[in-house]
Amino acid sequence: MTLIDNASLKSLNSFGIDAKAKTFYNVPSVDKLIDILKKYHGHPLFILGGGSNMLLTKDIEALVLHINLKGIEVISETENTVVVKAMAGENWHNFVLWCLKQNYGGLENLSLIPGNIGTAPIQNIGAYGVELKDIFVSCEAINIENQTTRTFIKEECNFGYRESIFKQDLKDQYIITSVNFKLTKTDHQLQTDYGVIKNELASHGIYNPSIHDISNAVIAIRQSKLPDPKEIGNSGSFFKNPIITAEEFKELKHNFPDAPSYKISEEYIKVPAGWLIEKAGFKGKRFKDYGVHNKQALVLVNYGNATGKEIFELAQLIQKTVKWVFNITIDTEVNIF
């Protein structure tokens, strides 16, 4: 069991922030995870997955456990469906590609989302009309306090928009070690309602798409809008799309007739946070070595040597300005540490 003191986390967070871990341990197996949780029971811990949904504003004065569990296997299958188990340290997009290679459907709209399997349920990741909860069966997790293993089925996870029980009632109490997904082998339920997907497919003359076509379309769309973290430090969408009441949207539409929206129900409307941020004047704005991406206002970027504190202060300025201009609160999707 090799622990590293004063370890740099720069290569392990997609913003590329050069924060340090007081102590660092790369977790290779569930058994090793249980061992170290027992050995360091009561010590401050920081659980690190793919590092794609976090902003480090300071050094981590704790034992950082990098969950690096690997493996993908078929648990069960019928003629039409299959349940696939993926370990927490598997890269999300690589897992999507693996499933597509087997012609398993359900994940194609979630292509190219950064991060690892283990953090996906915490955030209930989603894109282009599909959320993780739509194909989630269960996950296994280790209780940090007593090191027992528990299986959480979908109904226990309290999934909501970028929410789960792991961000709420059970925050910082469990470490997810694997996730089971139910996917289709035949009769794939394609989700192509989003106009950008239809437009991308049509531009290639595709009107009867396969799951591979949809994945390719989503990848092309994301690459056209979102910078590659390997080239420009970022964490994808930094803010959640706010959900407001129909009455509040009526007032917004009165003041800003071009305001886009997505109807959630008769009572609630989702407004794109990217539009709000762009309209507030932040799209493409650069401050020293950090700023707002010029193609997608939802994305805050580190051009090289920005600190997490600088990026966080920019996020706060954006929130304050959007509130002042539109009287709408936008919350961060990224976890701030």
Image (cartoon, rainbow, N blue to C red):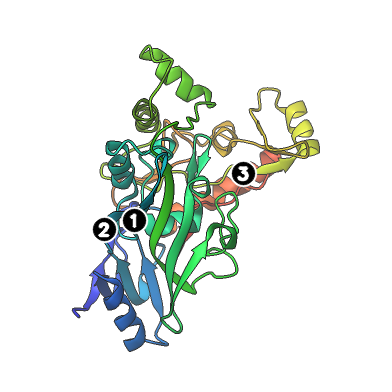
Residue wearing tag 1: 86
Q: What element carries label 3?
A: helix
Amino acid type of disc 1? Answer: Ala
Q: Which of 279 and 160 is in front in this view?
A: 160
**Residue holding disc 3:** 321
Residue furthest to the top in view is 205
Quarter occupied by the N terminus: bottom left
**Dots 3, 2 in contact, CB < 8 A:** no
Identify the mark at residue 71; answer none if there is no mark: 2
Mark 1 crowdedness (10 Å alpha carbons): few <14, some 14-19, many ≥20: many
For residue 65, the mark is none
Rounded to the nearest angstrom, the CA distance separating label 2 from label 1 is 6 Å
Q: CB atoms at circles 2 and 1 under 8 Å apart?
A: yes
Q: Quick one: label 3 or label 2, which is nearer the N terminus?
A: 2
First of labels 3, 1 by sequence position: 1
User: Residue at coordinates 63% horizontally, 42% vertically from top-left?
Assistant: 322
Amino acid type at image mark 3: Thr
Please tell me how many numbered marks the rendered image carries.
3
The residue sitting at 40% across, 36% down in the picture is 108
Q: Residue at x 30, y 82 (%)?
A: 36
Q: Residue at x 27, y 74 (%)?
A: 24
Q: How far apart are marks 3 and 2 (CA)?
A: 45 Å
Residue mark closest to the camera, 3 vs 2: 2
In the image, residue 17 lies at what x, y percent? 32, 57
